[in-house]
Amino acid sequence: MLLLNLLPLLHAAGTIACLFLPLPWPQRIGLSSAVFYLAPLLPGRLLRESLRGCPRDIAVGSPAFLRWWACFQCQVLFLRFPAAEELLRMVPGLYSLWLRGWGSRIGRLTYWAPRTIILDRGFLDIGDHVVIGAGVRLNPHVMERDELPVLRLAPVKIGDRALIGGYSLLTAGTEIADDEATRAFLISPPFSRWKDGKRLRESP
């Protein structure tokens, strides 16, 4: 697990190294950008696929947990430097396409407001014509303690034509119904279901 913590450093080093190649500056910048945005996609996607079918509660230190941890470390630079994702959001459709590369399902015409934060880019299931408000956090994983520490990991699901109020927090397994408009600053506990402005029972 400690060795996996080096992945963000290697990602950063590879990105910076491209700037010192004996190439014209436009090519150096293009190659550096490609390494920054695209190099983590293949390992991140493979690790995400390896987690399909895992139970929603994963014991800390288990093989499944280590696969998730490696997948998460592939994304750390984008959490450290959120402006990098804001650049992608400036081009219509590009950010959604990039998230699909991580393994998420993103519908048509999704709008990402500024300062959206996503912890697990491969664990989203978002319908068509969805609006994500400013400062929303999508956290498909949470760490909790039962008898032993466990990782609760499941996609955040948002139905068609839903509107997520600004500065909300949607955690692992949250489900938002079609046509729902949630209030601002909503905090959704793990595996909550929301419809008609009300929290229903936990999803099975």
Image (tube, rainbow, N blue to C red):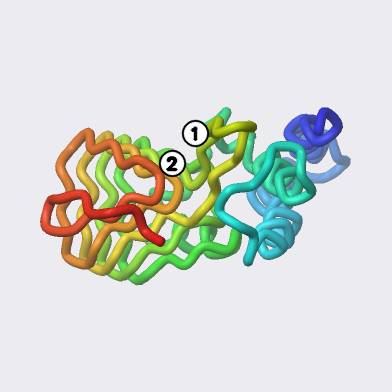
Q: Left or right: where does residue 39 sit relative to residue 107?
A: right
Q: Secondary structure at mark 1?
A: loop
Q: Nearer the viewer, residue 176 or 166?
A: 176
Query: How far across and down, in percent of the image, does residue 151 sit?
Result: 59, 41
Q: Is residue 144 left or right of residue 86?
A: right
Q: Residue at x 56, y 56 (%)?
A: 122
**Tag 1: residue type?**
Pro
Q: Quadrant of the N terminus?
A: top right
Write down the residue under mark 2: 86
Q: In x, y percent, where is residue 82?
A: 49, 34
Instruction: Give the crowd class for mark 2: few <14, some 14-19, many >=20 residues within 10 Å.
Output: some
Give percent across and percent down for residue 25.
72, 41
Q: Looking at the image, is 146 positioned above or below residue 160?
A: above
Q: Quadrant of residue 195?
A: bottom left
Q: State the residue in front, 145 or 137.
A: 145
Q: Residues within 10 Å of mark 1 (few under 14, many from 20)?
A: some
